[in-house]
Amino acid sequence: MRSRRSPAALRIGTFGYLAAEQRWQWSAETAAMHGYELGEVVPTAELLAAHQHPDDRAVFLAAVGTGDGFCLRQRLTDAAGNARVVVVLAEPGPTGFYVDLTGPVLAQHRTLIDAALPEYARLRGPIEQAAGMLMVVYGIPAGRADELLRSRAAEHGLALSRFAELLCAAVADGVDVPARLRTVVDHVLLTVHQRG
């Protein structure tokens, strides 16, 4: 049966490796960090490594294989597919600790994202507006419009958002929309909901 403990409850667990017997042990907390109940599976180096992020596996196995102490920040995926961030601390000898940092790391990421979103939206707005104009005028898809904007901005050494702001302002100031185009857009705006 898979662990039903909340991530907040999985803070610190222990593990041990008895080299003479080639046997691993882990606490209920460490088993739960990997998505198991204590006794559900037998911990092995291979099982522990299988839960590691592919980029972290070799480092983990090399550190464990030395028998020396180590401290590693690792990413792992539990048996249910949930990502975790842990620190694995081992003293020279048979014992070590898993410290689950998932909650604090996720909270820190949320804080950083929440702080960055308003600035991202401010910068991305003119880019989306400029790309939309290019899509309509040239009849091109969104990806191509974005490529065109990036290319022109780079050619002139401008940040993409600044180039898009300048383009939008220039088009707003310098383009007279023909009455026929306004009529078409008016009609579409009033009837587009009928297209289903």
Image (cartoon, helix red, strand yellow):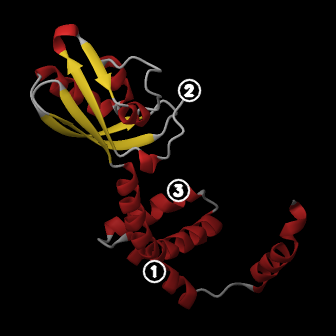
In 3D space, how far apart are the residues under numbered discs 2 and 3 (Cα atoms)? Answer: 50 Å
Is 54 above or below relative to 23? Answer: below
Tell me the amino acid under the disc marked 2. Met
In this rendering, would 17 be left or right of 166?
Answer: left
Give the residue pinned by disc 1: 165
Q: Secondary structure at mark 3?
A: helix
Q: Is residue 33 left or right of residue 176?
A: left
Q: Position of residue 104 (x, y in %)?
A: 36, 56
Name the amino acid, label 1: Glu
Q: Which residue, given by chain and number where applicable, does mark 2 sit on? A: 1
Q: Nearer the viewer, mark 1 or mark 3?
A: 1
Q: Check the image and report above or below for 72 versus 137.
A: above
- Give the residue furthest to the top: 21
Q: Which residue is mark 3?
A: 144
- Whether 17 is drawn above or below 100: the answer is above
Q: Amino acid at mark 3?
A: Arg
* Label 3 packing within 10 angstroms: few (<14), some (14-19), many (20+): some
Contact check, label 1 and label 2, Cβ < 8 Å? no
Q: Secondary structure beneath disc 2?
A: loop
Question: Is the residue marked by circle 2 packed among few (<14), some (14-19), or many (20+) residues within 10 Å?
Answer: few
